[in-house]
């Protein structure tokens, strides 16, 4: 014990007196802007089925946690229009559809999904997408909500349905502004009984889906109010190989090319995907619209689709790294996480006080907010926020639609520094994946004034911290070990 203290004391004195500064990283903020951001969000699948049954106070709290600035401040919400769940074995993943028969609808169907759609609208979420895993069962090849395929020639009927539903909600005051008619068309999610809805749409069939939808929107004067997102292929490696089969025919009808990233590409491969997508589409913007379920380190090693629940700062920074990859490496304008809320916590929160904060191998890392899978029997309606909630909040709160990215240059510049501006403010979102503290010495293209900061680390959840220090255009931004920090600057002198 004595020896331990002596050693520790000597070490502390030595470090203090040697005055070793934290590692300093110098970088310069470009005066010219790159992309203009369109949104940060996630999907309303499949948790609405369960959360709809929670007490109203919890549903309100959840809506606020997702959609208000005091929560994640999401600017994008993806409402899952169900197919009816025919032959899907998991009831949570089997949303009802309003489709009864051609032109006949029951808009009271799926009260769960439409409740949270309404909440997103009430909170003023500006970008609402209606996405679809499968056409209504009666329209698919096997009359089921999975394991079948889009029927060639059924595009007009499918489009009438989609636009009827979108128009219904728009008339009710909910501004659905995008439709994604085929989520992961590369997978039917069979065999029956299926774990979720899905409909294979062969690459050669995708142009019919897009053109039918565009024609229907256009005939109702909605083609500028509702954009078409396609094709939500699961991986960045596969999507470009399929573009030649459908995209040239309908490229002018697609608002944004959206993709998932379940292949967890390297930076080089991510950029190669974006370049290929631009080349295939005359430069359409690309969106990353679905991701979840990876373990891995803050610096990004060990990424890959896998089971395992890791609610800690390590995994939250790994996921933050994916957002930086999309925005900084890919230059993309929009990012959506997958399910936002999950019951795949992999442990029993009522019997273990550390369940929600400790990694386990039974659960999945697919949520920002978790709930007890046994809520219906044990009455536990608590919402468990994991570190991912707090890290994603930095992007939800500070990367707003209309803000623009300023590239960072200099030999120390790295992909984990994201700088966005609007007319009055710079927000600097910077990650330190390393186990030692460092400081960014940042030079702005104009005089600015550091006003405040927010930090998420192992011990802090979006804690308010001191503003960056400096003057004029030169500022120091301390980054503590294994953390994500946002520093705010006014675009004027202090
Ligand atoms: C419409 O759907 C709701 C919710 O499932 C159901 O209660 C109701 O019976 C349906 N109405 C008709 C006419 O089928
Ligand atoms: C829907 O969009 C219209 C037109 O842009 C706008 O006037 C209205 O406020 C929006 N409604 C909501 C709920 O966002
Ligand atoms: C909302 O849920 C969070 C997370 O469980 C909790 O910390 C907070 O107290 C709740 N707020 C209200 C108003 O219930
Ligand atoms: C600019 O961004 C800041 C910080 O995110 C925000 O408080 C402010 O309202 C924004 N200003 C405008 C004009 O959008
Ligand atoms: C983290 O460590 C890497 C490798 O040494 C270094 O390049 C990077 O600048 C460090 N980042 C921060 C924020 O300290």
Image (spheres, helix red, strand yellow):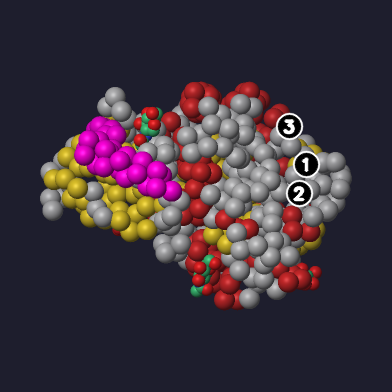
Q: CA distance from mark 3 to mark 1?
A: 14 Å
> Can you tell which quarter of the image residue 371 is in?
bottom right
Q: Residue at x 47, y 34 (%)?
A: 299
User: In the drawing, what numbered circle is on residue 196?
Assistant: 2
Does ligand 1 reach within 8 Å of label 3's beta carbon? no
Q: Position of residue 480 (x, y in %)?
A: 35, 45
Q: Secondary structure at mark 1?
A: loop
Nearer to us in this view, 465 or 60: 465
What kind of element bears circle 3? loop
Q: Based on the picture, tell me whether residue 15 belongs to the magenta stretch.
A: yes
The numbered disc on residue 202 is: 3
Can residue 161 be seen? yes
**Mark 3 or mark 2, earlier in chain:** 2
Instruction: Determine contact: label 3, label 2, CB under 8 Å.
Output: no
Q: Residue at x 16, y 41 (%)?
A: 473
Residue position for label 1: 189
- Is 301 covered by the magenta stretch? no
Q: Which span is picked out in magenta?
A: 1-28
Q: Is residue 150 left or right of residue 402?
A: right
**How far apart in space, not on screen, are marks 3 and 2 (Cα)?**
19 Å
Mark 3 against mark 2, which lies toward the viewer? Answer: 2
What residue appears at the point 26 percent right and 42 percent down from the top-left corner? 13
For the question of whether residue 336 can be seen, the reply is no
Q: Do the CB atoms of the residues marked 1 and 2 lie less than 8 Å apart?
A: yes
> Could you tell which of marks 1 and 2 lies nearer the N-terminus?
1
Q: Percent x, y for residue 134?
A: 73, 47
- With 272 as the anchor, is 55 left or right in this view? right
In terms of sequence position, does the residue under pointer 3 or pointer 1 come before the other? Answer: 1
Distance of label 1 from label 2 (alpha carbons) = 7 Å
Residue at 59% x, 70% y: name it. Answer: 59
């Amino acid at each position: 014990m004595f020896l331990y203290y002596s050693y520790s004391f000597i070490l502390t004195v030595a470090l203090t007196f040697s005055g070793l500064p934290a590692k300093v990283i110098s970088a310069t903020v470009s005066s010219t802007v790159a992309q203009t951001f369109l949104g940060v969000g996630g999907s309303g699948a499949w948790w609405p089925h369960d959360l709809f049954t929670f007490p109203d106070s919890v549903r309100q709290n959840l809506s606020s946690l997702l959609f208000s600035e005091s929560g994640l401040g999401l600017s994008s919400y993806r409402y899952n229009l169900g197919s009816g769940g025919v032959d899907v074995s998991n009831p949570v993943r089997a949303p009802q559809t309003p489709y009864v028969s051609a032109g006949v609808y029951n808009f009271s169907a799926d009260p769960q999904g439409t409740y949270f759609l309404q909440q997103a609208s009430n909170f003023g979420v500006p970008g609402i997408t209606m996405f679809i895993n499968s056409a209504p069962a009666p329209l698919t090849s096997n009359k089921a909500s999975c394991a079948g395929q889009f029927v060639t020639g059924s595009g007009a009927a499918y489009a009438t349905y989609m636009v009827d539903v979108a128009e219904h909600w728009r008339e009710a005051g909910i501004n659905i502004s995008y439709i994604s008619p085929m989520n992961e068309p590369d997978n039917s999610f069979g065999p029956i009984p299926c774990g979720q809805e899905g409909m294979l749409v062969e690459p050669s069939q995708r142009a019919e889906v897009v053109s039918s939808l565009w024609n229907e929107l256009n005939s109702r004067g909605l083609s500028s109010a509702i954009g078409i997102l396609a094709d939500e292929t699961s991986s960045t490696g596969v999507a470009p190989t399929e573009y030649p089969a459908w995209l040239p025919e309908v490229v002018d009808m697609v608002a944004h090319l959206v993709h998932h990233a379940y292949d967890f590409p390297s930076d080089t491969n991510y950029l190669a995907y974006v370049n290929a997508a631009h080349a295939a589409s005359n430069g359409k913007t690309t969106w990353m619209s679905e991701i979840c379920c990876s373990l891995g380190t803050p610096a990004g090693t060990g990424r890959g689709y896998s089971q395992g629940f890791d609610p800690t700062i390590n995994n939250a920074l790994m996921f933050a790294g994916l957002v930086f990859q999309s925005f900084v490496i890919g230059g993309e304008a929009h990012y959506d996480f997958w399910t936002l809320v999950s019951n795949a916590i992999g442990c029993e929160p009522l019997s273990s006080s550390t369940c929600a904060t400790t990694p386990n191998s039974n659960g999945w890392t697919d949520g920002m907010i978790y709930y007890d899978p046994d809520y219906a029997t044990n009455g536990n309606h608590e919402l468990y926020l994991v570190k991912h909630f707090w890290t994603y909040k930095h992007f939800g709160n500070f990367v707003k639609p209309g803000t623009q990215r300023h590239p960072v240059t200099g030999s120390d510049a790295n992909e984990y520094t994201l700088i966005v501006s609007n007319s009055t403010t710079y927000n600097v979102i910077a990650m330190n994946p390393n186990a030692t503290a460092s400081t960014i010495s940042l030079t702005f293209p104009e005089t600015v004034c550091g006003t405040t900061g927010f930090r998420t680390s192992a011990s802090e959840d979006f804690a308010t911290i001191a503003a960056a220090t400096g003057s004029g255009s030169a500022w120091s931004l301390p980054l503590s070990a294994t953390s994500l920090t946002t520093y705010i600057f006014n675009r004027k002198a202090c």
